[in-house]
Image (cartoon, coloured by chain):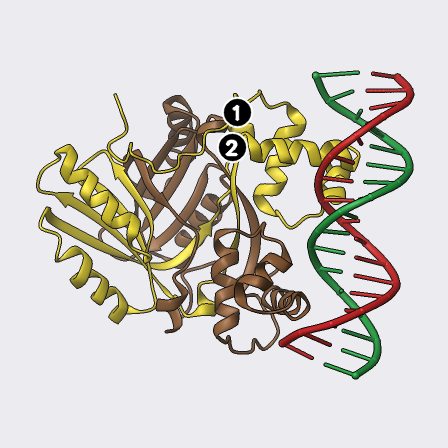
Chain colours: A brown, B yellow, C red, D green
Amino acid sequence: MQKSAGNSNPQAPRHPPATALDRIDRKILDILQRDSRITNQGLAGRVGLSPAPCSRRVKRLHDEGYISREVAIVDPARVGSTLIAFVSVELDRQREDVLAIFERKMAAQKAVQQCYFISGESDYLLVVACRDMEHYNAFVREVLANEHNIRRFRTSFNLNRVKYDTAIDLEAALD
Amino acid sequence: MQKSAGNSNPQAPRHPPATALDRIDRKILDILQRDSRITNQGLAGRVGLSPAPCSRRVKRLHDEGYISREVAIVDPARVGSTLIAFVSVELDRQREDVLAIFERKMAAQKAVQQCYFISGESDYLLVVACRDMEHYNAFVREVLANEHNIRRFRTSFNLNRVKYDTAIDLEAALD
DNA sequence: CATGAAAATCTCCCAAT
DNA sequence: ATTGGGAGATTTTCATG
């Protein structure tokens, strides 16, 4: 069994063997997941270490791929991206090449923030961020309606984003 | 018209008047959205500024709330969080108090990464991150099956996360 | 892992455009 | 009003114990 597609990942970062995480590592990850702007000595203080070994651990967490990247989260409302659409997509056929083509297209679309190949009635779930309805309409017409392999798609719109977290619950993850 | 609930936001950060963004600001945001670990002088170089004014702009983008936070993105596979579930939830009634209670509950659940109040057939869409099926089962039994106001919920599981971006397309957002 | 020093970086202030 | 340069203050990193 292999992933649905995209095994030709251009530059899949090859990470070192990856040592196990102890309690301090998880605490560091937990803090950085929520605020990566914290200074090293601030972090060190919160996990009960001196700055030097704390810095080493953070570097290791990066190098070994536990932290894949650090990003700034932009407030969508402030930059005029006010509409989030959820699109469930059903393809005509679930042949590997059809899936791969669709996935490549979605990955290339800047409006598509998230794209999941899913189980259940439809094949894909998209999360699309747009400026407004006009922009979403343009996206649908240009991207989805032009895609021959789509049997149908259904859109729901966001009325209120109650929660948007990028953090993973590390207690539950390892325990 | 008001948001569906949660207007009692405990500490909604009150941001300054918010000046408009020029091309350089958007370029800064665009870069930081994808990599906030870049040094200030590296950023300054890429946007064609010297370090000092670049630092000032970044500070302003934070202070005025364009950047709501900076976070480390943890690789789910590396920390044993391998299962993502999508749950569409239909409530018994769409009364404000029922919505508010449900939203508060979801916001408090660490496994719930995203929660949207949506238009369409169901009321909410949840993105839930779990260690495995057993963990998801426990989540469903403890959290959803105990919630009296839920008429029904339907789960789809992630088979392949094709794309996971937190960046907003700023070109489209402002044009 | 902690301590202490060196190197690099960030941030503030001031002059200049 | 915003930029660019420089000094001061932090921060990170590398050595040693």
Question: Does the image show residue A172?
Answer: yes
Marks 1 and 2: CB-CB under 8 Å? yes
**Which type of secondary structure does the marked residue at label 1 adopt?**
loop
**Which type of secondary structure does the marked residue at label 2 adopt?**
loop
Label disc, if present, on residue B65 of the rendered structure: 2
Q: Residue at x 64, y 68 (%)?
A: A50
User: Disc 1 residue type?
Assistant: Pro
Q: Position of residue B8 (x, y in %)?
A: 29, 34
Q: Position of residue B171 (x, y in %)?
A: 56, 29
Name which of mark 1 and mark 2 comes first in the sequence: 1
**In the picture provided, is A139 more to the left or to the right than B57?**
left
Badge 1 is on which residue? B16
Q: CA distance from mark 1 to mark 2?
A: 8 Å
Q: Position of residue B34 (x, y in %)?
A: 58, 45
Question: Does the image show residue A149?
Answer: no
- Name the one closer to the observer, A134 or A173: A173
Q: Split into 4 quadrants, where in the image is the N terminus of chain A?
A: bottom left
Q: Residue at x 72, y 34 (%)?
A: B54
User: Disc 2 residue type?
Assistant: Gly
**Badge 1, how many Cα within 10 Å: few under 14, some, many 20+?**
few
Q: Residue at x 45, y 43 (%)?
A: A113
**In the picture provided, is B173 more to the left or to the right than A17?**
left
